[in-house]
């Protein structure tokens, strides 16, 4: 099983490079030679739960391969801003990066990340049983380029759902709401609670608002990816913005506009908000050991709006920048991090369940692990992914989405801070988005 | 050059002494109270840094802990501290070596384009940093200076060098020319006279300028934010990274802030007279 | 100027020597500031955007960025935000700085030490200032908010409300920079000659009259120069906005500098960002000209 993975760019890779990476997490290489000795890999992701868990395993990778991993995890907006500049100018600072979901269309579309098929399908680089086709196509599809080549290996299939910190209170109010109207009625009934806000959401509205927008029958673009005319000023979009803005303003905590995801998670774990529409990845942390609401939290699918139920699915994947000078070594890292064994270990040892590998999701332990306080979160997960496979997620494969995302942020901020009515705010967002697309050179 | 007397002796005044004395005491008491109120936000952050747990609202003085600092010191923070130290001191040194002779020339030599040079230097000091970051970013990509301490040293020259020239020439202006002229007649050439006579007489000014340059470089956030990533990250940028990474652990954020401000606060108190000198002469830049 | 007794040969030699001393600095300055400035202007004439290859040398519409800036509502809005922030902070800093300078214009060892204390906000790293105010403006960890709530005057989060966010930033900015105006005005006050003050005291002038008729005329120029310095530096406001509001809510605090930053480093409109930056440099240059006219030859506080 000895084979050479060293390329010229693997400085000091050594001639006796071995195939230890075939069995990740297992014994070191035969012969003791470390194939990536002397290689310094620069890896970066935004600071989600998963990359924090992975950090605990990286020393194993370093020990097995001899590579030194510099691991950088800034916050979501900082990560995206830096990586976008990095990629757009062809930088070679990073070897392994996170292909962020709102940017995937832009980065992959521009050819800034390396298609990985050559690595996955080459038996010299990847053993056949690694399982390149094991990933849910519903999420992997978002990381493919126009030729259908996979440009990122999804480390997460995250769904948008709903959760409460205190199911006993929610039960008294009629149970987890199944519709958006029901949600508002419940929050109204709950009224002012001491030391607890009714509703909380992260301030990245270009993500958290979209399920509301679409449940009201609104859209971001008219018909992505073919017709990218923004449609943010339709009556449906305005109604959705009005509803969501009111939710945040009336039931959110003081200063709700400044809450980033980390603060939202902290707040939920401490039981300082009753209800949140949020990512599964964040909500399940309420059931974690360090949470004050582990015994009382509850979950449901995202409530349905007047035009149906539109929970989103997000994916992030590990990718290799086009400018990286150590692509083979970078692939070794991705291959190791995303192997079946590592995915399973993280699921078992870290309770990390937002995985994209079908073999794990369909495995016997998944359902058990995702039954939290009697709620079958595993089923909500599978159902949501199935729903989202129906095509309404296409808006995110659009290269200009990042710009529009910021406009949506600004619109919701304007509504919540009462600078503009929902109508004015969405009309401004529409006008600005058109301007942005024009500057980006999009033909409408 | 305006010299701000920190503790000038009170000139004897005759008039109703008692009333005046009372007023003096009142003014001083008021000033002390005002200072406490003004610095309260800063003091609050410092006390937060000694706070053990999540309940950051209570005062930490009861059970102070160094846990936040220990946690910081085991992470990547020390490396960024080192980067800041190297970038700030080397850039300051370079600016002094290149800038001091230029300041002297500008102070002594009445040439035709003198006014234009002075304006250029002033304009450089005034230009918004974003104007530099755009071309520097693009150029550093090609020159492989991106995310390097060398790259930071060079861009810090864009404000340090004008500052040295600007500030030092005011200091040189205040050194009497007759001394150099005497040296010239004794056979010294221009630069011998500069190094033997003028420079030694300007040591306080030199010290003030050095401190000012160091503080400005140390305080830089914008350039380092744009031009560094991991290997050359400076301490101010590390705070931000860290702030968002650790999930808003305010105790640690406060500890990082306290550490980053420590050198400049120390400078302020240890060499305050020089610092005030420098600030006055330089008309400080952000 | 050098004594006339020295020969013209010495004069020429001296000139060469001075030129030699000046040259290295000018070369370094040219490479580090002039070349980038030219590069900036050149990119501002292109639609440079790394997403679209080939835009780096596209000079087909050299004024395109400037024209679109004039019609870009976001840019024009950022100018308005900038103007509000600049005017308010400069006024606040002048008032507070002047007040403190008058208070501290007292020969005493204690006051001397206090002056140094008052300087602190200015020398702190701006990012630390931003962290300090982030704590104070975040309701759930802010001692300020809790104290106000405890005495029955609860205040809503200031940095997330459209009506107050900019003023919260202005307040923090004034806290950071009042020491500068205080220092400059203190120096100017100490330059006021003794005689008119003593004469006025003998004539029985009150404090207010003393200030208005005796001191103010002497420090008027220092006031103007200080104001312009702060005005120029207020254009550079960044860390406070970056940490406290990120330009929000809904762009209520998006000043021109921040707008240029977002356009360039978030959306990769490098050409457009360069054009905005060029306009900002032009603005700073004009103000610098004013300073150099007002200040003496090349020292602001050379009296």
Image (cartoon, coloured by chain):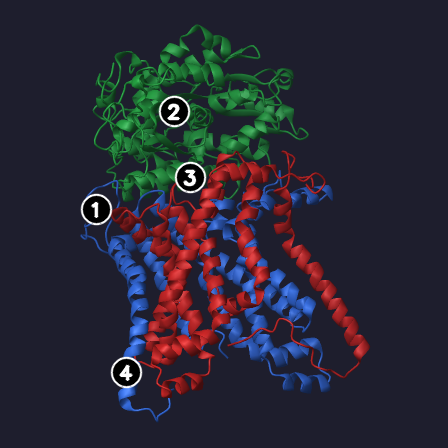
Chain colours: A green, B red, C blue
Q: Residues within 10 Å of mark 1 (few under 14, many from 20)?
A: some
Instruction: Tell whether label 1 touches label 4 (CB within 8 Å).
Output: no
- Pick the quarter of the image with the C terminus of chain A: top left
The secondary element bearing badge 4 is classed as helix
Q: Residues within 10 Å of mark 3 (few under 14, many from 20)?
A: some
Distance from the alpha carbon under mark 4 to that under mark 1: 51 Å
Pointer 2 residue: A63
Point 29% across, 74% down: residue: C20
Instruction: Note whether residue A224 is visible.
Output: no
Left or right, A17 with respect to A239, comes to: left
Q: Nearer the viewer, mark 4 or mark 3?
A: 4
Q: Residue furthest bottom?
A: C5
Q: Nearer the viewer, mark 4 or mark 1?
A: 4
Q: Is residue A46 visible?
A: yes
Q: CA distance from mark 1 to mark 3?
A: 26 Å
- The tally of labels here is 4
Is disc 2 placed on a helix, strand or loop? Answer: helix
Res C13 label: 4
Residue nearest the viewer, comparing A227 with B188:
B188
Q: Label 3, on which residue?
A: A78
Real-space Cα separation, disc 3 to disc 2, in angstroms? 30 Å
- The residue carrying mark 1 is C55
Across and down, in percent, residue B51 comes to 64, 39
- Crowd tier of the residue under label 4, counting other residues whose Cα lies within 10 Å: few below 14, some 14–19, many 20 or above: some
Kindly indicate whether the residue at mark 1 contacts the one at mark 2 (C-beta within 8 angstroms): no
User: Element at badge 1?
Assistant: loop
Q: Position of residue A73 (x, y in %)?
A: 43, 34
Q: CA distance from mark 2 to mark 1?
A: 45 Å
Q: Are marks 2 and 1 on the same chain?
A: no
Q: CA distance from mark 2 to mark 4?
A: 67 Å
For this orientation, the residue located farthest to the right is: B18
């Amino acid at each position: 099983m000895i084979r050479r993975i060293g390329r010229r760019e693997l400085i000091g890779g050594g001639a006796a490079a071995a195939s230890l990476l075939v069995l990740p997490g297992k014994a070191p290489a035969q012969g003791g030679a470390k194939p990536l000795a002397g290689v310094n890999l620069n890896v970066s992701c935004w600071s989600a739960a998963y990359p924090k868990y992975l950090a605990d395993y990286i020393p194993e990778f370093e020990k097995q391969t001899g590579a030194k991993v510099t691991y950088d995890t800034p916050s979501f907006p900082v990560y995206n801003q830096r990586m976008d500049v990095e990629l757009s100018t062809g930088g070679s600072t990073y070897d392994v990066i996170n292909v962020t979901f709102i940017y995937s269309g832009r980065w992959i579309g521009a050819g800034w990340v390396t298609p990985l098929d050559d690595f996955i399908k080459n038996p010299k680089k990847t053993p056949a049983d690694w399982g390149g086709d094991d990933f849910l196509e519903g999420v992997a599809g978002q990381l493919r380029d126009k030729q259908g080549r996979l440009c990122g290996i999804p480390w997460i299939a995250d769904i948008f759902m709903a959760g409460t910190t205190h199911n006993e209170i929610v039960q008294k109010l009629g149970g987890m709401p199944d519709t958006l109207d029901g949600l508002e009625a419940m929050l109204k009934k709950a009224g002012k609670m001491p030391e607890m806000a009714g509703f909380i959401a992260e301030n990245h509205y270009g993500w958290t608002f979209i399920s509301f927008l679409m449940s009201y029958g609104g859209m971001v673009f008219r018909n992505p990816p073919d017709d990218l005319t923004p449609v943010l000023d339709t009556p449906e979009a305005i109604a959705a913005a009005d509803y969501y803005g009111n939710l945040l303003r009336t039931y959110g905590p003081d200063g709700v506009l400044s809450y980033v995801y980390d603060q939202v998670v902290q707040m939920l774990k401490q039981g300082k908000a009753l209800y949140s529409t949020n990512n599964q990845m964040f909500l399940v942390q309420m059931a974690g050991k360090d949470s004050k609401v582990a015994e009382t939290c509850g979950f449901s699918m995202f409530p349905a709006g007047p035009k149906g139920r539109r929970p989103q699915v997000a994916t992030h994947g590990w990718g290799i920048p086009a400018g990286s000078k150590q692509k083979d070594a970078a692939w070794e890292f991705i291959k190791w991090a995303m192997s079946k064994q590592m995915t399973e270990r993280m699921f078992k040892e870290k309770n990390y369940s937002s995985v994209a590998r079908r073999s794990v999701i369909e495995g016997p332990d998944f359902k058990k692990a995702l039954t939290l306080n009697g709620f079958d979160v595993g089923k909500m997960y599978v159902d949501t992914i199935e729903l989202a496979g129906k095509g309404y997620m296409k808006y995110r494969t659009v290269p200009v989405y990042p710009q529009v995302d910021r406009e949506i942020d600004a619109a919701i901020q304007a509504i919540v801070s009462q600078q503009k009515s929902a109508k004015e705010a969405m009309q401004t967002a529409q006008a600005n988005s058109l301007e942005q697309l024009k500057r980006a050179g999009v033909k409408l | 050059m305006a010299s701000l007397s920190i503790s000038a002796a009170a000139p004897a005044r005759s008039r109703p002494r008692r009333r005046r004395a009372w007023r003096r005491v009142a003014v001083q008491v008021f000033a002390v109270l005002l200072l406490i109120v003004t610095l309260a936000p800063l003091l609050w952050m410092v006390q937060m840094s000694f706070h053990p747990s999540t309940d950051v609202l209570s005062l930490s003085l009861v059970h102070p802990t160094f846990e936040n600092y220990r946690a910081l010191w085991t992470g990547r923070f020390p490396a960024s501290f080192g980067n800041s130290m190297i970038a700030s001191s080397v850039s300051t040194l370079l600016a002094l070596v290149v800038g001091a002779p230029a300041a002297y020339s500008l102070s002594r030599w009445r040439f035709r384009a003198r006014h234009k040079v002075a304006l250029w230097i002033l304009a450089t000091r005034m230009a918004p940093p974003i104007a530099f970051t755009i071309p520097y970013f693009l150029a550093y990509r090609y020159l492989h200076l991106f995310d390097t301490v060398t790259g930071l040293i060079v861009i810090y020259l864009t404000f340090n060098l004008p500052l040295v020239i600007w500030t030092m020439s005011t200091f040189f202006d205040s050194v009497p020319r007759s001394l150099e002229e005497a040296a010239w007649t004794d056979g010294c050439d221009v630069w011998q006279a500069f190094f033997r006579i003028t420079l030694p007489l300007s040591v306080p000014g030199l010290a003030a300028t050095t401190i000012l340059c160091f503080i400005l470089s140390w305080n830089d956030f914008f350039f380092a934010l744009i031009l560094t990533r991991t290997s050359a990250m400076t301490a101010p940028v590390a705070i931000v990274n860290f702030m968002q990474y650790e999930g808003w652990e305010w105790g640690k954020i406060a500890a990082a802030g306290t550490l980053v401000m420590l050198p400049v606060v120390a400078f302020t108190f240890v060499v305050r007279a020089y610092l005030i000198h420098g600030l006055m002469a330089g008309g400080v830049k952000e | 100027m050098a004594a006339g007794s020295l020969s013209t040969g010495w004069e020429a030699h001296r000139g060469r020597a001075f030129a030699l001393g000046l040259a290295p600095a000018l070369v370094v300055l040219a490479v580090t500031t002039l070349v980038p400035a030219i590069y900036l202007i050149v990119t501002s004439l292109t639609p440079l955007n790394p997403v679209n290859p080939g835009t780096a040398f596209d000079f087909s519409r050299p004024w395109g960025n400037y024209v679109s800036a004039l019609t870009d509502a976001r840019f024009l809005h950022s100018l308005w935000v900038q103007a509000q922030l600049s005017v308010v902070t400069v006024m606040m800093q002048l008032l507070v700085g002047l007040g403190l300078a008058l208070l501290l214009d007292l020969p005493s060892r204690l006051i001397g030490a206090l002056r140094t204390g008052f300087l602190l906000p200015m020398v702190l790293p701006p990012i630390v200032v931003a962290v300090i105010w982030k704590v104070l403006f975040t309701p759930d960890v802010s001692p300020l908010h809790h104290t106000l709530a405890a005495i029955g005057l609860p205040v809503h989060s200031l940095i997330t409300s459209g009506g107050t966010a900019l003023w919260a930033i202005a307040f923090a900015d004034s806290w950071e920079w009042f020491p500068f105006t205080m220092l400059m005005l203190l120096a100017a006050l100490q330059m006021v000659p003794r005689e008119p003050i003593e004469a006025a005291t003998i004539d029985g002038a009150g404090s207010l009259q003393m200030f208005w008729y005796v001191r103010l005329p002497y420090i008027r120029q220092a006031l103007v120069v200080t104001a312009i310095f702060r005005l120029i530096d207020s254009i550079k406001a960044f860390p406070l906005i970056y940490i406290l509001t990120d330009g929000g809510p809904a762009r209520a605090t998006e000043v021109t500098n921040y707008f240029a930053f977002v356009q360039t480093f978030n959306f990769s409109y490098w050409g457009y960002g360069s054009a905005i930056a060029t306009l900002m440099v032009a603005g700073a240059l004009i103000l610098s000209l004013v300073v150099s006219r007002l200040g003496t030859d090349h020292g602001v506080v050379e009296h």
